[in-house]
Image: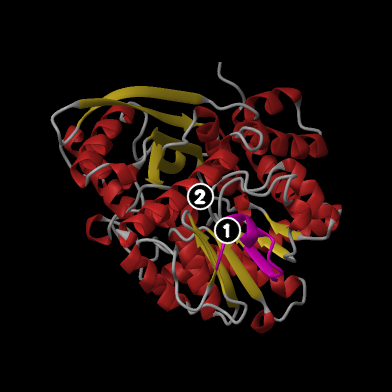
Amino acid sequence: MQQAEQAEQTEEAVEAEQATLRQRATVGGPDPFTTAQRQFDRAADFLNLDPAVRLILRNVQRILQVDFPVHMDDGSIQIYKGYRVQHNLHRGPTKGGIRYHPAVTLEEVKALAMWMTWKCAIFNLPFGGAKGGVVVDPSQLSKDELENLTRRFTTEISLIIGPESDIPAPDVGTNAETMAWMMDTYSMHKGYSVPAVVTGKPVSIGGSEGRTEATGRGVMIVTLEALKHLEIDQSKATVAVQGFGNVGANSARLLADQGLKVVAVSDVSGGVYNPQGLNIPDTLRYVQEHGNLRGLPQAKPISNDELLELPVTVLVPAALENQLTDQNAEKVRAKVIVEGANGPTTPEADEILNRNGVFVVPDILANAGGVTVSYFEWVQDLQHFFWSEDEINERLHRIMRNSFQRVLQTKLSHDVDMRLAAYIVAVRTVSDATNARSIYP
């Protein structure tokens, strides 16, 4: 009886933590697209952007909304809402992930699509930005139901996706298996295999080596570059990571491999903290066995809010949007913030962090390792020639390092913060393409 009560209390605590994160990501701050537009406006003002170009880039180009039926295991039919948004097509086909999450909104997907445009521009990838999402909690569906949902959603958005038009990838709530179902569905409609229609697939069907950990590896690379710029000894640096999914877990593991001390990590069940450092391989095994971080031995339980305020060298928010706001930014004691998530910092929080001297590596620079290796995968699929994992990692390291330095030099030469510097680089690149192509007709 006592065990049952404890289990129920644990479930309630997990649900409460999830609700807190979702609320902060949705109603706890501005809607994500408003944030994305405000960030763009700063760069547009700085660049004195042509009003017509500004109007074009400030808005998304295409929105596809679908309400589609799915066969459930009990024989019933459920209707789910999904989106695919393309922000800009001036530099090539669009690229962006598919998100399965109960808090997905059109405004969020529009913001994510816009941020993808800027990421691709900073890294000089020949893509515009896109994003997709389905309003669903994947943890509440069986594997068969998830497959049914994915195949039907793929069919619905097949109107606009394709290897030369719009290439999806995994995001929150989706993975390589999801991409395999999408690729197979699209291929069945075509009558032949089209591996380049999605990235983030299993290697056995055209996926790329190194793709799974690419975003986390990119976070690690720019973290080391930031510490080098700030003349901070990485062997003495401490790290806290909010979010222990693919991005957060790989960021923590790779940073620990580089000699940084990871002292805190968190997921929807809450966080764990050990000022002496966590054993990340043991932590990963614990999560694999127990499903979350709750109860991790030799670690103090803390909340996600407490993790954001720890006295660490590096804070990596790798969860959802709007985690750092004007309500908690003053309490942040990290010297460096590396945004593993998209949009974790509101504009109001940005002002506070900059005023307090926190060095922020923005999301459109910090977490672009995933789309960079997705580009590698797309190229490999199109040419039917694949690279080794060492080649992938070497190319990623070179591109991430060069892009960081490009943004850093923009920051130093114009005496601006890193986010504005990144947007200056990105918006200038896309506006040049818009001007070169002109407007049809």
- Say whether residue 327 is left or right of residue 403: right
Residue 403 visible from this viewpoint = no
- Say whether residue 232 is left or right of residue 285: right
Q: Is residue 125 magenta?
A: no
Q: Separation of disc 1 and disc 2 at Cα?
A: 8 Å
Q: Which mark is residue 17?
A: 2
- Residue at 69% over, 70% down: 312
How many C-alpha atoms fall within 10 Å of the one at disc 2: few (<14), some, or many (≥20)?
some
Q: Residue furthest left?
A: 75
Report the amino acid beneath label 1: Ser
Q: Where does the magenta region start and end?
A: 301-315
Q: What residue does disc 1 label? A: 303
Closer to the N terminus: mark 1 or mark 2?
Answer: 2
Q: Nearer the viewer, residue 12 or 403?
A: 12
**Secondary structure found at label 2:** helix
To which quarter of the image does residue 151 belong?
A: top left
Q: Nearer the viewer, residue 185 or 288?
A: 288
- The quadrant of the rendering that contains the N terminus is bottom left
Residue 388 is situated, as x and y percent measured from the top left of the image, at 35, 71
Residue 434 is situated, as x and y percent measured from the top left of the image, at 62, 32
Q: Which mark is residue 54?
A: none
